[in-house]
Image (cartoon, grey):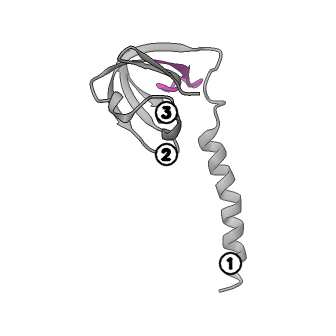
Amino acid sequence: MFRLMPLSVAAVVLVVPAAALAHHGWSSYDAEKAIKITAPVTDVSWGNPHGAAKVRHAGKVWDVVLAPVARMEARGLSREMLTSGKAVTLEGYPRKDGVAEMRIERVTVDGKTVELR
């Protein structure tokens, strides 16, 4: 059993950084091409490592990558503000590969703009 422990530890040490880099890499978004859309929210996930939402815009369902919950709440964006059917204005960056997904920099809802980054 003790011989397997170093292998298990080595596997964790190798896998965790790779997963973190894959998840938190922003290089797949086009920071030179900011977009701004206004659309109704169709779904919201309020959790960590960051929130997420979906909106329907221009015939597509967009995946919306929000900030971590603690940051959103500290800056004044609550879960109650992002309800299904509510129109929001989202400003951020689209994915470079054309997938309907955007990383959000700011959200405007009910006349209030919240900076997420």
Q: Give the mark toward the camera: 1 or 3.
A: 3
> Above or below — where is 89 with respect to 101?
above
In the rendered structure, which segment of residues is drawn in magenta? 90-103
Q: Earlier in the sequence, mark 1 or mark 3?
A: 1
Q: Which mark is residue 72?
A: 3
Could you tell me the amino acid type at mark 2? Asn
Quadrant of the rendering where the C terminus is positioned: top right
The residue drawn where x is 51% and y is 29% is: 75
Reading the image, the residue beneath label 1 is 5
The residue drawn where x is 54% and y is 20% is: 92
Discs 2, 3 touching: Cβ within 8 Å: no
Is residue 92 within the magenta segment? Answer: yes
The residue drawn where x is 42% and y is 17% is: 112
Q: Could you give the CA–CA distance between mark 1 and mark 3, rounded to whole angstroms?
A: 40 Å
Could you tell me the amino acid type at mark 1? Met
Q: Earlier in the sequence, mark 2 or mark 3?
A: 2
Is residue 81 within the magenta segment? Answer: no
Number of residue marks: 3
Reading the image, the residue beneath label 2 is 48
SS at circle 1: helix
